[in-house]
Amino acid sequence: MDASVQNEIRAFVIQNFLFGQGAQLADDESFLEAGIIDSTGVLELVGFLETTYGIAVADEDLVPANLDSVARVARFVERKRNEQGSRVAG
Amino acid sequence: MQVERFLEDSARLTPEKVALVCGDSRLTYSEIDRAANRLARGLIGAGVGRGDRVAIYLENSAEAVLGIFAALKAGAVFMVVNPTTKADKLAFILNNSKAAALITDTRRRAVVAEIADRTPHTGIIVMAGRAGDVAAGGKRVLQLDELLRQSVDDGKPANPSIDIDLAALIYTSGSTGTPKGVMLTHLNIVSAATSITTYLENVEDDVILNVLPLSFDYGLYQVLMAFKAGARLVLERSFTYPHAVLETVVAEHVTGFPIVPTISALLLQIDLRKYDLSHLRYITNTAAALPTKHILDLRSLLPHVKLFSMYGLTECKRVSYLPPDQIDIRPTSVGRGMPNEEVYIVDEQGNRLASGVGELVIRGANVMKGYWELPEETTRKLRPGPLPGENVLYSGDLFRVDEEGYLYFLGRKDDIIKTRGEKVSPREIENVLYELAGVAEAAVVGVPDPVLGQAVKAVLTLRDGVSLTEQDVLRHCSQRLENFMVPKLVEFRAIMPKTTTGKIDKKTLHMTAVI
């Protein structure tokens, strides 16, 4: 996995949802369980992913499996980029 | 009739029916009833008695539902506390209510440990989740799992309470900035639930989805009403991941979906035609007015769904609903009073008006007993009604009534903000802002927001030589306030606008703070 993407996502979450206090945030910690993010937060996160990584996030992508921890978001971005890359290449 | 009978009657009539779907668990009425009996016995055994307050500090979960009914079965008064409540506010609520017991889980144990020494009334902690040590300062800690073990007696405990006893305290934001406990009797709750399930025509076949926190009376009543109707409740933690929730709506054949305008704003960003919502019978909206555009869009996307536009106050649960056949005729009205309830408007002197504009007054068995230990605030809100000893509720909200008797919300008489449908007291947030070193003046206003309804905005001036960033302010707030109260916007100003009497001029701020 692209470590820099994971770090960028982590930084975004800490900056926007934890207001800078994120030293305790584990990469696999559930945003829902930790009460970090709400439905409008998810939209902010999606906006960040779309503009930063040039990926298109569909309605169907809005599920915890894709978005509910720093590590999941990073994997999701990687998968989306690969899908879009192969589509362009193919 | 007591509120716990909603569960007990359904458990007798349809014991094997799945009553609650929550995450991976599916619990029948009988399972919930027996588990609630066990937990009630555990509470009684630990010393909880008739009329004692039992706080439930949990996410939306099966354990929270059990906690509510167990408290009632023990003859106690339940209070559901928002799970994002921070230590100081939790301590305030426990001390204000003198709660005897707190039901929570290991995820929140750090907060519970932090306040253990300053919550002397709360001697009993029931812990759900993984067993583990809790530093609880001399409190008695019970493990929920142990109380629910099969070997524990699951018969209904003896319960001497009657329907004019208190069943719940619901803390709500007040304009003073200090939360107030709304006292509701069994009779209040049973009356409100009966009126609402009557006009929603709830039946046993209903499958009701709840994504709203149980600390919010609108969320809480979904549990109570589903159990009253012998229906099924699908309890979600939140609406954080809309697609996942909509898949649940499809899979569980959901028939009733209660929303607030924030949810409709999010729903309308999704292509709803991709989902098979053919089982959906009704959508309800309350807490803040649904924008007319949302009504029109929902009506055209879901023409088979009855859309109920409603209005309510925690102090009486629900005030009015617009019959769905009126929504295309008068989309901006919140309707008329519920069955078995009378609502009318009065002028400044309290004279009843047939039509026009006035303060809305509510009369019915659903009207609260008052605010917990706040006799003066109670007297302002509850005033003598037409019969001896009777009180009616002054809503504090201005309404217009049309010639046919339909109500239109005009505005509040106080400055309470409604964000995501929840009431937020500007004073409560301002008090927290003043605790931040360097803040000279703080004013909180609500600004229009397409998703939130109103977004909380903090306007600050700083002391000379101090520099604070927006993030400093938000971090400070997020450590002290429930998540929905944390400002979305922060603006620093050199000078705060003032009235001629030297107070912060919120009217001017409102006009200049929009963005």
Image: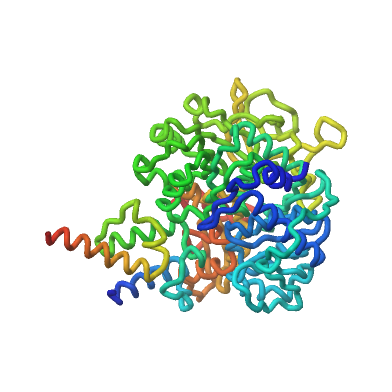
Residue at x 51% of width, y 36% of height:
B282
- x and y percent of residue B131 in the render? 63, 74
- x and y percent of residue B415 in the render? 61, 48
Residue at x 71% of width, y 74% of height:
B116
Q: Could you say which quadrant of the image residue B88 lies in?
A: bottom right
> Does residue B315 show up?
no
> Does residue A30 show up?
yes
Q: Could you say which quadrant of the image residue B102 lies in?
A: bottom right
Q: In this view, does B385 lie above or below A30?
A: above
Q: In this view, does A4 lie above or below B304?
A: below
Quarter that holds the N terminus of chain B: top right
Residue at x 51% of width, y 27% of height:
B330
Depth check: give the residue in front, B484 or B223. Answer: B223
Colouring chosen for the image of the structure: rainbow
Going by the image, does B122 lie left or right of B397?
right
Residue at x 82% of width, y 48% of height:
B165
Residue reaching furthest to the top: B403
Q: Could you say which quadrant of the image residue B225 lies in?
A: top right
